[in-house]
Amino acid sequence: MTGTKSAVAADGRRAPHSAPLGSASRRTIGAVLAALLMTHDAGAAEPIIGQASVIDGDTIEIAGERVQLNSVDAPEEWQVCLDERGADYRCGKESASALDAFLSASRPTRCEFAGRDRYGRFVGTCLRADGKDVNRWLIESGNAVDRDTDNKGLYASAQQTAKSNGAGIWRAQPEHACTARFGRVNRKPSC
């Protein structure tokens, strides 16, 4: 043991020799930690499959997890919109009911996640058992608008279809649909 000093405990016994970590050991520990972190992140992003309960027109719950539908903005349950005659109707309640009926037609629902929102909910794209895109359907049926306006929106074509067909909130004159949708919540329209 030339050139190496051993530590001696207070009672006179020799302590086990501990050498500083070499670069190979540090790389191994780093790789193990990275693998653990990747496994944790992958687990957090695993799809959820199950029976969905409707919270509101753009939020569902599966297996105790709230899922905000990605790029979808539906009226709040209390919100009213204008119909084709210019009369108020409870578009938020109608949106939630339509979503519930749509999901009930083909269960279970599968959601894949893009991240979490500021409330801690998962943000994701959901599909019915028959493969139909729930997010797209909500917008195409006029029960919601495309929330993502930065690049003309993920569902811009679905929204244009709803507008052209006068579906859902688009039953009113198109220039009034967005005003009715957003006017009572003081948000800038995305449509």
Image (tube, rainbow, N blue to C red):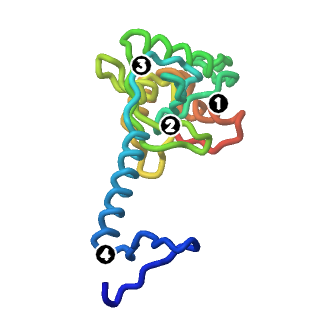
- The alpha-carbon separation of the residues under discs 3 and 1 comes to 34 Å
Q: Nearer the viewer, mark 4 or mark 1?
A: 4
Q: Which residue is mark 1?
A: 180
Give the residue type at disc 4.
Answer: Ser
Distance from Cα at disc 2 to Cα at disc 1 = 28 Å
- Mark 3 vs 4, N-terminal side: 4
Circle 4 sits in a helix, a strand or a loop, which is it? helix
Question: Which residue, given by chain and number where applicable, does mark 2 sit on?
Answer: 122
- Mark toward the viewer: 3 or 1: 3
Which callout, 3 or 2, points at the residue further toward the start of the chain? 3
Number of the front mark, 4 or 2: 4
Q: Position of residue 172 (x, y in %)?
A: 57, 24
Please identify, in this view, whether the residue under mark 3 or under mark 4 is nearer the observer: 4
Looking at the image, is mark 4 or mark 2 earlier in the sequence? 4
Let me know if residue 92 appears in the view.
yes
Q: Which mark is residue 50?
A: 3
Q: Which mark is residue 168?
A: none
Residue 23's tag is: 4
| Percent x, y of residue 54 | 54, 19
From the viewer's perspective, tell me whether residue 55 is left or right of residue 34: right
**Which residue occupies the foreground of this view, 69 or 94?**
69
Q: Earlier in the sequence, mark 3 or mark 1?
A: 3
Q: CA distance from mark 3 to mark 2?
A: 15 Å
The answer for how far apart the CA atoms under marks 4 and 2 are is 39 Å
Type of amino acid under label 1: Ala
Place of residue 183 in the rendered image (x, y in percent of width and height, measured from the top left): 69, 35
Q: Residue at x 59, y 22 (%)?
A: 55
> Gap in Å between the C-alphas at discs 3 and 4?
47 Å
How far separated are the C-alphas under marks 4 and 1? 64 Å
- Dot 3 falls on a residue whose secondary structure is strand
